[in-house]
Image (spheres, grey):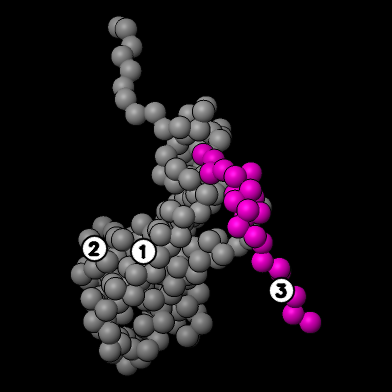
């Protein structure tokens, strides 16, 4: 049987909302380190997606350098099997996008605040998309470049697809209380302090 919750009256809703005001994250030890670890974990998930996708379609991935940049090669001949190369090239961004979507959809306790590691994961996914649709869009080994070569989509269309999803994630983060002050490290009162201090010589 499908259970449906009875609608609350406007008075009940406003009372519930007032009992759970938007709160800022409480400062935690090693906040920046945990945020950075979350960001790095997101990048590792991206690269793992490429490796797993290569093996899944029968490729033999390898690690190398392209103009001093660390690169994972698919082990697939994109001229003979472009569809397999597309799966490989899109896997990294797909994994990060799905990871961010899972974090945003995962049920959390009402009024809870996301920790720095979770924020770092989300930031890693959004940051990677921003990189690939801007600075990394036209590089020789860019995921966007290879996706455009091995499909009927253009670089612009691919950028709009992933950029649009990332934009929706940013909007959702903005409207969720648990991600208040998303990119700031709060002080003891939960507020961001901006300024400088002078220390005597």
Residue at the (56%, 35%) spot, across then down: 26
Is 90 situated left or right of 24 in this image? left
Query: Is residue 98 visible in the rendered structure shown here?
Result: yes
Which residue is under mark 3?
4
Q: Is residue 93 left or right of residue 114?
A: left
Q: Position of residue 165 (x, y in %)?
A: 39, 69
Query: Residue placed at 53% from the left, 61% from the top?
Result: 104
State the SS at label 3. loop
- Which residue in the protein does label 2 denote? 134
Q: Residue furthest right?
A: 1
Q: Looking at the rendering, in which quadrant would you find the N terminus?
A: bottom right
Q: Which residues are magenta?
A: 1-24
Nearer the observer: mark 3 or 2; the answer is: 3
Q: Which residue is mark 1?
A: 167
| Nearer-the-camera pick, 70 or 136 | 136
Which is more N-terminal, label 2 or label 3? 3
């Amino acid at each position: 049987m499908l259970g449906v919750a009875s609608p609350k009256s406007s008075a009940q809703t406003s009372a519930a909302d007032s009992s759970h005001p938007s709160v800022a994250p409480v400062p935690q030890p090693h906040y920046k380190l945990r945020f950075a670890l979350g960001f790095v974990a997101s990048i590792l998930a991206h690269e793992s997606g490429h490796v797993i996708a290569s093996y899944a379609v029968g490729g033999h991935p390898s690690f190398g350098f392209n103009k001093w940049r660390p690169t994972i090669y698919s082990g697939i001949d994109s001229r003979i099997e472009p569809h397999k190369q597309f799966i490989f090239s899109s896997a990294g961004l797909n994994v990060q996008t799905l990871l961010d979507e899972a974090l945003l959809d995962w049920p959390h306790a009402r009024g809870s605040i996301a920790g720095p590691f979770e924020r770092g994961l989300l930031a890693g996914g959004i940051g990677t998309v921003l990189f690939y649709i801007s600075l990394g869009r036209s590089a020789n080994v860019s995921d966007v470049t290879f996706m455009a070569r091995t499909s009927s989509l253009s670089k612009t269309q691919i950028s709009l697809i992933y950029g649009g999803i990332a934009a929706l994630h940013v909007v959702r983060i903005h409207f969720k209380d648990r991600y208040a002050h998303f990119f700031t490290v709060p002080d003891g009162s939960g507020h961001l302090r901006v300024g400088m201090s002078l220390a005597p010589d």
